[in-house]
Image: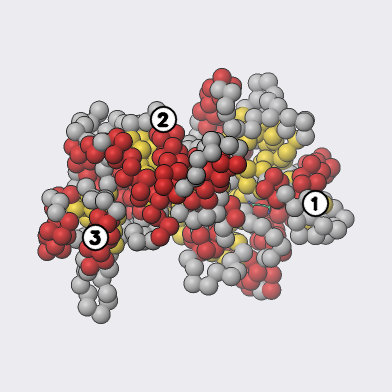
């Protein structure tokens, strides 16, 4: 079922196989009809993950990227909507040559084509089928798996069932019944799991292992226990305790290509679990219409980026979610921000809670509390600076006030036209864009210190050789440092105001130059403050354990000192 940890388990299995020297990729299947996750509500579905090539995707792809340490293209996410749309478009353009287009074989065929395409060049492809066994919407995908098994031969396919064993609190006994039902329903689709991963509050005991063993008819060492953990990064280590990697390789008749070494990973996990100190961070956002939903899931990548950065300093992290609306009406709540080591304003859309966020930014700036602004967080930092330092009374983003006298954040004329025609899809800046960094800024120092400049510059020269690249490089300036970060927004800093704002002390430390020559601001900083940095991008999408995002790294470093 959803939420049981299929994504992180898949990511962990991939990490383990990678560690034995194999090239691994993963495909996430989302059985919903939406074409992609761009139009889903983050408060219902969790965060939207953005890929380098501009895909708006389910957050599981984020787990794969974080665990595998590779950048994945959007084609690694398949939705039912995409499959049907492709088949229907093909039919409309005469691609089926007068045949009757039917569920079988055309839908599973398209699913298989997509999986094969994503697998090109890899030793292993992990295909994660979302949802619950027995769901109607899963059927075409199970059918496609069976068909791939027939085409490849059973020895090249391994099925892993991830199941949940509940422990009802009134009896305190772990129940295997849902797992038995899942096995039965899988077998109705001709699928017999080679391994069963048992998610539960506690490790599985011998009695329950035996029960499942007899039911499914597989050796008990193929039944792997995966109890609740403090940090998701523990999972590969726990799975390896049961020698899961070798067992999977055995199933394929394969041997490790190299000796597995998870010692560096394990050292970082240990730091997350036993930190020497703790930094207290406030994330000021708009938390409305959430109901019982767990807030943390709508900012999962920011959470993870904070964990990655603080692990570098052997520090734990305490995150408090602060509803920006409360700051609008309650001065005491605003003053409470003094007790934090750092303040983050994350991305967001619309006008609700904006004035509270602006108040928090002013508070951070004036009280010299380390501040990191992400996307909307940067736009609102520019608004605050324009209002309070540059005397532009009521300056605003036109997203909130289209009639403001000082539209310091505005939509570009080319996008305006698309918006008027309600072509919202085309109005977003999505995916990785190159930013040119100004020398000797805090931002360029951080990217240099974390070796991201070199890495990205190398990737850029590779990209230039690859005409199929999906990055937006725009116009590059000679001998300037370049970084690639991902984007998901509509509005931009209005070029009309940049020089006036800069004269008042805010530094625009990086920009993208579009092919038509328009400059889009990517980073800002206030050199006088301990740490006051914001970006139009979402650097959290490229942060990994052992390779934290440079901006989060700088932010936590300053927060620890403060
Ligand atoms: N609402 C802002 C825009 O569309 C920022 C979006 C974001 O924070 N992701 O430009």
Q: Nearer the viewer, residue 5 or 118?
A: 118
Between the C-alphas of marks 2 and 3, the distance is 33 Å
Per the rendering, the mark at residue 184 is 3
Q: Nearer the viewer, residue 147 or 172?
A: 147
| Pointer 1 local density, CA inside 10 Å: few below 14, some 14–19, many at least 20 | few
State the residue position of label 2: 120
Quarter occupied by residue 95: top right
Between the C-alphas of marks 1 and 3, the distance is 53 Å
| Position in image of residue 256 (x %, y %) | 22, 31
Between the C-alphas of marks 1 and 2, the distance is 41 Å
| In this view, the mark in front (2 or 3) | 3
| Position in image of residue 111 (x %, y %) | 43, 43
* Extreme-bottom residue of the structure: 170
- Of the image marks 2 and 3, the number of the one nearer the N terminus: 2
Placement of the N terminus among the 4 image quadrants: bottom left
- Of the image marks 1 and 3, the number of the one nearer the N terminus: 3
Q: Is 5 placed left or right of 484 in the picture?
A: left
Q: Is residue 554 visible?
A: no
| Position in image of residue 2 (x %, y %) | 39, 60
Instruction: Say if mark 1 contacts mark 2, CB within 8 Å.
Output: no
| Position in image of residue 368 (x %, y %) | 64, 54
| In this view, the mark in front (1 or 3) | 3
Quarter occupied by residue 457: top right
| Pointer 2 local density, CA inside 10 Å: few below 14, some 14–19, many at least 20 | few
Q: Which type of secondary structure does the marked residue at label 3 adopt?
A: helix
State the residue position of label 1: 420
Which residue is at a point 52% across and 48% down the rendered structure image? Answer: 84
Quarter occupied by residue 432: top right
Which residue is at a point 67% across and 48% down the rendered structure image? Answer: 425
């Amino acid at each position: 079922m959803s939420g049981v940890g299929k994504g992180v388990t898949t990511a962990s299995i991939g990490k383990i196989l990678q560690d034995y020297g194999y090239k691994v990729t993963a495909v996430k299947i989302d059985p919903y009809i939406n074409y992609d996750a761009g139009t889903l509500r983050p408060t219902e579905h969790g965060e939207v993950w953005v890929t380098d090539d501009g895909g708006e995707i389910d957050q599981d792809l984020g787990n794969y990227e974080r665990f595998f340490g590779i950048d994945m293209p959007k084609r690694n996410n398949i939705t039912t909507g995409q499959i049907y749309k492709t088949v229907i478009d093909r039919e409309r353009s005469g691609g089926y040559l007068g045949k009757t287009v039917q569920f079988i074989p055309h839908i599973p065929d398209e699913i298989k084509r997509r999986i094969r395409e994503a697998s090109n060049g890899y030793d292993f492809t992990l295909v994660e089928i979302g949802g619950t066994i027995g769901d109607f919407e899963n059927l075409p995908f199970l059918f496609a798996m069976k068909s791939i098994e027939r085409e490849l031969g059973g020895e090249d396919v391994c099925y892993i069932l991830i199941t949940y064993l509940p422990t009802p609190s009134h009896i305190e006994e772990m129940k295997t019944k849902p797992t038995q039902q899942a096995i039965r329903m899988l077998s109705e689709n001709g699928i017999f799991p080679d391994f069963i991963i048992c998610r539960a509050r506690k490790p599985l005991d011998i009695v329950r292992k035996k029960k499942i063993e007899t039911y499914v008819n597989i050796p008990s060492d193929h039944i792997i226990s995966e109890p609740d953990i403090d940090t998701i990064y523990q999972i590969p280590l726990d799975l390896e305790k049961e020698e899961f990697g070798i067992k999977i390789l055995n199933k394929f008749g394969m041997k490790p290509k190299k000796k597995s070494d998870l010692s560096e990973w394990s050292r970082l996990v240990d730091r997350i679990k036993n930190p020497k100190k703790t930094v207290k961070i406030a994330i000021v956002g708009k938390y409305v219409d959430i109901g019982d939903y767990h807030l943390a899931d709508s900012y999962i990548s920011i959470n993870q980026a904070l964990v990655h950065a603080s692990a570098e300093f052997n520090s734990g992290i305490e995150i408090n979610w602060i509803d920006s609306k409360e700051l609008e009406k309650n001065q005491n709540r605003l003053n409470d921000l003094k007790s934090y080591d750092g303040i983050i304003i994350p991305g967001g859309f619309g006008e609700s809670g904006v004035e509270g966020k602006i108040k928090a930014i002013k508070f951070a700036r004036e009280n010299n509390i380390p501040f990191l602004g992400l996307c909307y967080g940067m736009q609102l930092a520019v608004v605050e600076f324009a209002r309070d330092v540059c005397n532009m009374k009521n300056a605003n983003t036109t997203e909130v006030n289209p009639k403001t006298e000082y539209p310091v954040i505005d939509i570009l004329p080319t996008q305006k036209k698309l918006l008027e025609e309600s072509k919202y899809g085309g109005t977003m800046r999505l995916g990785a864009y190159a930013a040119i960094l100004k020398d000797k800024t805090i931002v360029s120092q951080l990217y240099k210190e974390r070796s991201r400049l070199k890495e990205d510059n190398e990737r850029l020269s590779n990209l230039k050789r690859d005409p199929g690249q999906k990055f937006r490089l725009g116009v590059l300036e000679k001998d300037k440092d370049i970084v690639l970060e991902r984007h998901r927004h509509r509005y931009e800093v209005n070029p009309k105001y940049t020089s006036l704002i800069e004269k008042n002390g805010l530094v625009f430390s990086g920009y993208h130059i579009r092919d038509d020559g328009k400059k889009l601001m990517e980073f800002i900083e206030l050199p006088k403050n301990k740490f006051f940095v914001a970006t139009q991008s979402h650097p959290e999408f490229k942060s990994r354990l052992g390779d934290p995002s440079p901006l989060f790294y700088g932010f936590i470093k300053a927060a620890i000192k403060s």
